[in-house]
Image (tube, rainbow, N blue to C red):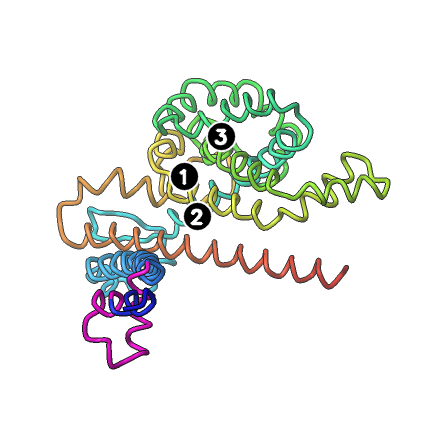
Amino acid sequence: MHSSETLKVQGEARVPGTKRNPGARAFALRFFSGDEIARALVTISAALILLVTVLLVYELWINSHLAREKFGWHFLTTQVWDPNAGQFGALAFVFGTVVTSFVALLIAVPLGVGAAIFLSELAPPKLSNALTFCIELLAAVPSVIYGLLGVFVLMPLIKQYLHPVLKGTLGWTPLFSGPFYGPSMLVAGIVLAVMILPFIVSVSRQVLLAVPNDQREGALALGATKWESTWKVVVPFAQRGIYGSVFLALARSLGETMAVTMVIGNTPQIKASLFAPGYSIAAVIANEFTEATYDLYVHSLIELGLVLFALTIIINGLARLLVSSTAKFSVSST
């Protein structure tokens, strides 16, 4: 028997039942070769992520039905949170979560992107690697440590130095009016900014380093300076990855619990001043879940978790729409 005929017989022997069906035999050979197995495994992995998300939403939805049935949409529009009277409203917690996350992004994004540009484009390689290692260590610090630093270091510094300056220059605005007693949304925002800064710096630096050198060399060959090539060529080329680092930081700030609980004041109220205390969704769930003594109380806290999940999806969705519209505008303008 010829060698080709021998291989054919061996292939048919490995895949029984396919001798009379060439199409099935070809599919089976591709499947057992490894490509189809790999495709099936990665497809299952992606489907499992979607399944976990759906199950999470389902459990939150089912276990919050008492609060949804009693309060309806008023749960999102009222700020009264009185467990003794059985009245629950999430507006104050949503307000505190959004404000502290916005303050954190307002501080961390310029600093993080600027640091990433310096580390990837301007700093010597040894200095860049050393500073990057130190910055990435900040991401490994437990959140309770940031909370302690906020209580014992940041609050006294703000009360002694930053509050008088902001009060004297911007005290006429609602954002910086009123006294400063310590725990406040401003302190929570600054602590969150420090916590999310390593994510922005690390991811943005890797994205900037992934920009092809041809982009830099082409700009320099056309007469651009080092900064012009960085700002006008490298950063726009990597802007989607930089936006991704901001989304990652935003998700971290929205769900942060321990550090925010220690410095925000844990007061369910809505005030325009950043010097006033507030409350976040994650903080109230962590503080009061073990104290919930009846079903409506528990279901209201679980509905807060559902609200936080929906808030995260909505804010990230709006941010991605903004990125998409910005990218389209920049392409059309060029």
Q: Residue at x 42, y 35 (%)?
A: 277
Amino acid at pointer 3: Val
Q: Earlier in the sequence, mark 1 or mark 3?
A: 3
Determine the residue located farthest toward the front in the rendered image: 1
Q: Nearer the viewer, residue 138 or 2?
A: 2
Residue at the spot 66% in from the left edge and 25% down from the top edge: 123
Give the residue displayed 64% in from the left and 43% down from the top.
Answer: 211
For residue 324, what is the image quadrant? bottom right
Q: Where does the C terminus fall, quadrant-wise?
A: bottom right
Q: Nearer the viewer, residue 173 or 110?
A: 110
Q: Which mark is residue 95?
A: 2
- Whether the residues at callouts 2 and 3 have beta carbons within 8 Å, the answer is no
Closest to the observer, 62 or 196: 196
Percent across and percent down for residue 8 are 29, 69
The kind of residue tagged 1 is Gly
Q: Is residue 91 left or right of residue 12?
A: right
Question: Mark 1 or mark 2: which comes first in sequence?
Answer: 2
- Callout 2: SS: helix
What residue sits right under mark 1 in the picture?
Answer: 278
Magenta stretch encompasses residue 144:
no
Marks 1/2 in contact by CB < 8 Å: the verdict is yes
The local crowd at label 2, few if under 14, some if 14 to 19, many if 20 or more residues have their Cα within 10 Å, is: some
Q: Amino acid at mark 2?
A: Phe
Q: Are marks 1 and 3 in contact (CB under 8 Å)?
A: no
Q: Which residues are magenta?
A: 10-33
